Image (cartoon, rainbow, N blue to C red):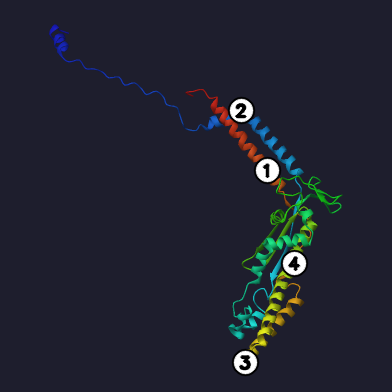
Amino acid sequence: MTEHATAAMSNQPQQVQLVYAMPSPQPDDEIDLGQIWAALWAGKWWIILSCMLATVVAAAIVITMPNIYRAKVVVAPSEEAQGGGLGAMAGQLGGLASLAGIDLKGNKVDKAAYAQEVVKSRAFVVDFIKRHELLVPLMAAEGWRPESDTLVINEDIYDEVSQTWVRKVKPPQAPKPSDWEAFDAFQKTYTVMQDKRSGMVTISVEHYSPTLAATWASLLVADINSAMRQADVNEAKRSIDFLKEHLNKTNVAEVQKIFYQLVEQQTKTIMLAEVRPEYVFKTVDPAVAPEKIEKPKRTLIVALATIVGGMLSTLVVLVRSFRQKPAGM
């Protein structure tokens, strides 16, 4: 190259080359299934042992849990409960009956629905417990002996020898359970459900003893029938007394005729109520002592415990594995 060419090139502006540095690799946030599988495989024995431990512990717990049986009785609302019978015959007597507190207008009362609410009420349940002396089997029982069909009573709650309550509680509670406690305990043992399509009502009772569960279910039906029947009889008697009292105060023949008809209807109500043991509910399927255990669901409990144990142990293995992972990997 000549000197002139070299000088010309030296006089031209020099081009600056920019070198771009490559960005440093960022941590990969994507889940690497291979790493997860490797971590799980490395901790497989920990996961297996955790599942086995959870299974053994759950099995040991459910074995000690007492069996609970459920008895149920299926009943159908009677004609009287559905507003039939005398109530349907008395529409022609007009509104004068309302003076005596008698509903004979075409407003049919659903006694079956009313009876279902009564059987759930505190007053009915407390009276039911007292009448049939259910406080001890309700509040002190902790199991059942199938060979002798007897209850296992908790000695720390009730002393069978002296027949006294010995449970230790803080004031204002007393050793003997209150009506409130008894009601709260009993309402957890039974359910009342009605099928909206068929109208059938099912009353279910759960207890350690299948015999007592069936007995209580039957007694509930008998007592609610008796309570509703007695309430209607008492109401009819009060109405008759009212009608007879006002019958003597009027000389109008037409009014007297209506009063006599009302008295006749209320007398029929009393008569039919007294001859119908199943006044509101008719038994369709009576309660029997169940042979199948309702609770606890031992197989389900053990299976769930195994699954939970496996999930927790898997989570622990993954967390420990990724915490030990070197930075930048």
- Position of residue 66 relative to residue 17, above or below, is below
Q: Which element carries disc 2, helix, strand or loop?
A: helix
Distance of label 1 from label 3 (alpha carbons): 81 Å
Q: Is any part of residue 246 visible from this angle?
A: yes
Apparent side of residue 133 relative to residue 318 in the rendered image (left or right): right
- Position of residue 225 relative to residue 178, above or below, is below
Distance of label 1 from label 4 (alpha carbons): 42 Å
Q: Position of residue 198 (x, y in %)?
A: 64, 69
Distance of label 2 from label 1 (alpha carbons): 25 Å
Apparent side of residue 103 relative to residue 278 in the rendered image (left or right): left
Distance of label 3 from label 4 (alpha carbons): 43 Å
Q: Which numbered disc, 2 or 1, marks the residue that appears first in the sequence?
A: 2
> Disc 4 marks which residue?
223
| Mark toward the viewer: 3 or 4 | 3
Q: Which element carries disc 1, helix, strand or loop?
A: helix
Q: Where is residue 325 in the image (x, y as percent from the top left)?
A: 53, 25
Distance of label 3 from label 2 (alpha carbons): 102 Å
| Circle 2 Cα neighbour tier, 10 Å, few/some/many (<14 / 14–19 / ≥20) | few
Front-most of residues 179 and 45: 179
> Disc 3 marks which residue?
252
Q: Where is residue 36 in the image (x, y as percent from the top left)?
A: 55, 31
Q: Which numbered disc, 3 or 4, marks the residue that appears first in the sequence?
A: 4
Amino acid on which the number 2 mark rests in the picture: Ala
